[in-house]
Amino acid sequence: MDGMITDGVIEAADKEAAIERLKNSGVIPLEVKAPSQDGFNFNISFRSRKVDLVSFTNELASLLTAGLPLDRGLQILAEISEQSKAKEIVQSLLKSIREGMSFSEALSKHPNIFPRLYVNMVRAGEAGGILDTVLGRLSDFLESSKELKDHVVSAMIYPLILSITGGISIIILFTFVLPRFSTIFAELGSSLPFSTQVLLAGSGMMKSYGWMMLIGMIAAWFVLRKYIATEKGRYQWDGIKLKLMEDVIKKLETARFCRTLGTLLAGGVPLLQALNNSREVIGNRVIAGALETVSKGAKEGRGITEPLASVGMFPALAVSMIKVGEETGTLHQMLIKVAVIYEKSLNQAVKRFMSILEPVMILLMGLIIGFIVISMLLAIFSISDIPV
């Protein structure tokens, strides 16, 4: 076969490694290029951690299910990644694995991208030899979590826009419109209606000390954020939120906890470890603190139903369904069912909350702007009452 030109496929880490391998086999490479990945049309970017984690997990699970080894699957993902950050992370994972690390150990080197829950699930999948199955469950879990979060965020967009536009309108009225009328009403003095006097005084204060008020508000905001960042401040803030929106928050945390715990147990993670990891996804510190009792109860051999009922943070229906799952040996399946039920219930609760919040905000903005307009009209009408 000397002097013959042939083509084929060789597996290597990169182009340079492929050329070196060909030379060692006695073949003189004329052209070496990466094959096109027509069978796998994937795209990863890490612009949004949660979205990209879903994409990465789903794509890697598909590759492993198709029968590719882990290092080959990561190599394909690295080759097709268009974003430099994504390529860098996948290549780092690939390098760690080729150096002898397990996949979970490689993931743990990037805690900002792969949370501990994710790493523990992968470790359980590696131990049981079902990594592709576990990644598929992780993908479903991340997608449902993202959908839940996106629904809550999208529901808050309209009230946020309404608050911003209403606030800007009030600021414009106080700083630009009312000062023009103040010169007209200056000679009227105390004959102005009381509401107009209050309005003009507020306008003058905002015009004179507006920047100081703005700086004070920004400073107060930063101080509040710094306090909330502390453990004590976060606990108190979460307690206030729990009192104001108890129904919505309890349903949200119930869905999060049950889906996480169910996914972990289905992936082979031991109960105590799964409970500790599930507590980490709870956003409300008050509820997360109460769930310590559940871990303690499970450690004492009392299961999780009795401790869950004692803390009183989860709805009675959820506790009853978990009890049935625990008694029938289908706990992980029942936890997923509970999560599905409360995710749907949460969507309805958010819609109800928004249906109340939106008209309340519109009414509040209307009352403020209506007070300003009526006060100005009363002042204008009072001009005709002044004796000549």
Image (cartoon, helix red, strand yellow):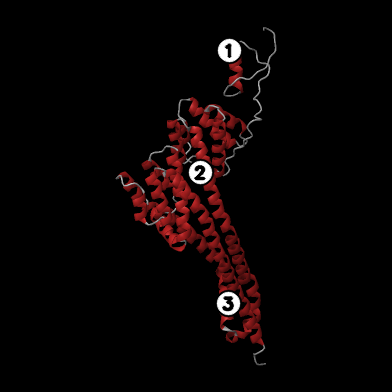
Circle 1 sits in a helix, a strand or a loop, which is it? helix
Mark 1 to mark 3 CA distance (whole Å)? 88 Å
Amino acid carrying label 3: it is Leu
Residue at 64% over, 86% down: 382
**Compared to 9, does 303 lie above or below?**
below
Whether residues under marks 3 and 2 lie with C-beta atoms below 8 angstroms apart, the answer is: no
Name the amino acid type tagged 2. Answer: Phe
Query: Helix or strand or loop: what does disc 2 sit on?
Result: helix
93 displayed left or right of 1: left
The disc at residue 199 is: 3
Pick out the residue farthest to the left: 300
Packing grade of label 2 (10 A; few <14, some 14-19, many >=20) is some
Pick out the residue farthest to the top.
Answer: 2
Residue 58 position within the rendered picture, expressed as x and y whole percent measured from the top left: 56, 38
Spot occupied by residue 50 in the image (x, y as percentages of width and height) = 54, 44
Q: Nearer the viewer, mark 1 or mark 3?
A: 1
Q: Nearer the viewer, residue 175 or 293?
A: 293
In the image, residue 249 lies at what x, y percent?
46, 57
State the residue in front, 249 or 91. Answer: 249
How far is mark 3 from mark 2, CA to CA? 54 Å
State the image coordinates of residue 295 (x, y, percent, origin top left).
35, 47
- Say which residue appears at 58% left-offset and 22% top-offset: 12
Q: If you read the primary sequence from the N terminus, does the residue marked by circle 1 or circle 2 appear first?
A: 1
Residue matched to label 2: 141
Q: Is residue 76 above or below residue 328?
A: above
Query: Residue 116, can we see it?
Result: no
Residue drawn at (53%, 51%) of the image: 149
Which circle, 1 or 2, is nearer the viewer? Answer: 2
Q: Secondary structure at mark 3?
A: helix
- Mark identifier at residue 24: 1
